Amino acid sequence: MDADKIVVLDAGKLVEFGSPAELLQNDKGMFRALVDDSGDKDALYEMAAGKL
């Protein structure tokens, strides 16, 4: 969450690119799914919100 941009790859192909805050807005995004399944979900959302 402290990165300016995130690249998400699936099977070696680019599927998402953007800031953490931007990627978390995509309800069906892979990055958001990873964060939502994380045990640190709340902390990660807070960190991303600080980057807006």
Image (cartoon, rainbow, N blue to C red):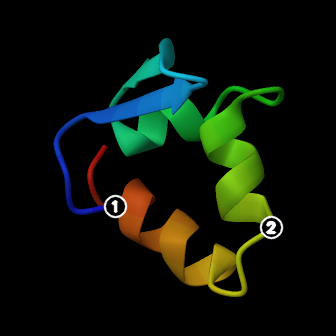
Spot the residue most to the front: 11
Mark linked to residue 1: 1
Residue drawn at (19%, 52%), measured in percent from left and top? Answer: 3
Residue drawn at (69%, 26%), measured in percent from left and top? Answer: 26
Q: Kindly identify which residue carries mark 2.
A: 37
Specify whether 30 is left or right of 45: right
Specify whether 37 is left or right of 23: right
Q: Quadrant of the N terminus?
A: bottom left
Q: Residues within 10 Å of mark 2 (few under 14, many from 20)?
A: few
Query: Type of residue at label 1?
Result: Met
Residue drawn at (71%, 75%), measured in percent from left and top? Answer: 38
Residue drawn at (68%, 45%), measured in percent from left and top? Answer: 32
On screen, residue 24 above or below 36: above
Residues under numbered marks 1 and 2 in contact, where contact means CB atoms less than 8 Å apart: no
Closer-to-camera residue (50/27): 27
**Closer to us: mark 1 or mark 2?**
2
On screen, residue 40 above or below 38: below
Mark 2 or mark 1, which is nearer the start of the sequence?
A: 1
- Percent coordinates x, y for residue 21 in the rendering: 44, 41
On screen, residue 27 above or below 20: above
Q: Quadrant of the C terminus?
A: top left
Q: Residues within 10 Å of mark 1 (few under 14, many from 20)?
A: some
Q: CA distance from mark 1 to mark 2?
A: 15 Å
Residue 34 placement: quadrant? bottom right
Query: Type of residue at label 2?
Result: Asp
- Percent coordinates x, y for residue 50 in the rendering: 31, 61
- Percent coordinates x, y for residue 45 in the rendering: 55, 65
On screen, residue 21 above or below 44: above
Dot 2: element: loop
